[in-house]
Structure formats: structure tokens, C-alpha cells
Amino acid sequence: MFILVTNDDGIQAPGLLALTEQLSRVGRVVVAAPDRERSATSHSLTLHSPLRAEEVQEQWFAIDGTPTDCVNLGIHGLFRERPALVVSGINRGANMGDDITYSGTVAAAMEATLMGVPAFAVSLAVSSGHKQDYLPAARFAARLAKTILDRGLPADTFINVNVPAIEENMIRGTQLTRQGKRIYGDLVIENTDPRGRKYYWIGAGELDFKDLDGTDFHAVHRRFISLT
Ligand code: MN
């Protein structure tokens, strides 16, 4: 029995390290993760070029592909057996509401579910630039992993977990939620590069969300761990 861990922030991300440390208390952990940051690659597969998997430490594979590639390879090719569980994360930043459609973290869990392996994604709701303590989210992930290994998940179901980025004793509990609604800004940054050519930067604007009862945003904003 083993747990396959992946992410979209890359194999060197601190969230992945914290997650593997805590999951090791629950079962044997192997890693198949992108060799670099692959956030916002959604559920994309690499179909038109080969993939390389470098074993950077025992049973840890850095792959030059997307999170979905990693899960696909991790379930079908890299290891002798199929994993009992796939856990994706811990992502640096929340994955809630419409953002889920862009998320490589969430897509990795979805890929596992499509392959018939129970899975969940876990994200820490930090805003960039803030100090990040992944331990509370990692501890919760280990508890959830144990529950799923003991009791299973319904078919075609995976869980998207978002943990508020606050001290563990400030977290009020867990809530089962539905996917919320993001309000996207329309900011595109336009600038000129050193060679005089125009460039654009998307996704840099301030984001808002609809504070709807029962949603992931609503729960995390009120210091609950959200399970969608
Ligand atoms: Mn990410």
C-alpha cells in the first residue's frame, strides 16, 4: 500500500515537503511531481513530446510534464502497483470557486479519480508574499488520508480541500461546501520590454468573490477548513 503525492508548484515546493512528512505517518509515500512550477495548467496532458522522469531521491520522481501527466504516469508506469490514494498539494494559494477550472492541483486529483484511484487536493489559502506555514494543512491532510484509506470514497468523487492560512488553534473546524463564485478583475498589464516590443501580463488584478452561504469561499473566510 502506498500514497502517491503530486502538486503543481513543482517538486521542490515547501507545501509538497510538509505534506509528504505528515502523510508518512499514515502510509508509505511516493512522489511524482512536476520538475518546475506548473500552476494553472489545469487538466492538460503532454501528448506530443516524450516525458522524462528523474528519480531525484528514492521513490521521488521529478517529471518534465504537467500534474496530470505525473498522476497518469504515477498510476500506470512508474511504480509496480497502483497507489491506494493520490494526494495533490499542498498548493501555495487557495483553489476555490471558478479558479478550480484553472488549477493543476485540483486537476491532478481529478485525474486520479478518472483512473479509479481515490484522491483529494489540498490548498493553503495564502496570498502571495505572506509567510506560509503548511503544517496545519499537512496535519489535516494526514487525518483525511487515514479516513479515506479506512473508509474509501464514493466512486467518481474526489475532495477539494482548502485550509485557511492561520494558526492551527484559530481554525474553527471543517465544513462541507459547494464550489463558490469568483469575481475576476479585468486588469491586463501592458508594458514595453527592453527591446521595445509590447508585452501583456494577465491574471495580475485584484480578485473578489461572492460571499454565498455554503460555499468554499464562505467557509475559508470564516476560518473553517472547506471540503468540496
Ligand atoms: Mn500552484
Image (spheres, helix red, strand yellow):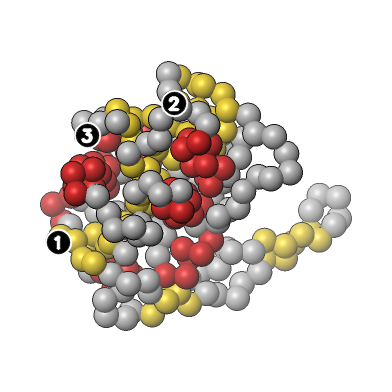
Residue at mark 2: 80
Instruction: For marks 2 and 1, give the CA distance.
Output: 41 Å
**Residue 10 on image: x %, y %:** 51, 38
Q: Compared with residue 101, is residue 12 higher up or lower down, i.e. above or below?
A: above
**Residue 213 on image: x %, y %:** 27, 80
Instruction: For marks 1 and 3, give the CA distance.
Output: 24 Å
Q: Quadrant of the C terminus?
A: bottom left
Name the residue rendered at 56%, 24% in the picture. 54
Number of the front mark, 2 or 3 = 2
Please say whether residue 112 is visible from this viewpoint.
Answer: yes
The amino acid type, in three-letter code, at marker 1 is Arg
Ranked by sequence position, the earlier of labels 2 and 1 is 2
Q: Quadrant of the N terminus?
A: top left
Q: Does mark 2's beta carbon lie closer than 8 Å to ligand 1?
A: no
Query: Dot 3: what SS?
Result: loop
Instruction: For marks 2 and 3, give the CA distance.
Output: 20 Å
Ranked by sequence position, the earlier of labels 2 and 3 is 3
Q: Viewer-proximal residue, 75 or 52?
A: 75
Residue 30: which quarter of the image? top left
Q: Compared with residue 123, is residue 150 higher up or lower down, i.e. above or below?
A: above
Residue 212 located left or right of residue 203: left
Residue 202 located left or right of residue 129: right
Q: Tell me the tag on residue 172.
A: 1
Residue 31 located left or right of residue 133: right
Ranked by sequence position, the earlier of labels 1 and 3 is 3
The amino acid type, in three-letter code, at marker 3 is Val
Name the residue rendered at 53%, 47% in the picture. 68
Residue 66: which quarter of the image? top right
Whether pointer 2 and pointer 1 mark residues with C-beta atoms closer than 8 Å, the reply is no
Q: Tell me the tag on residue 26.
A: 3
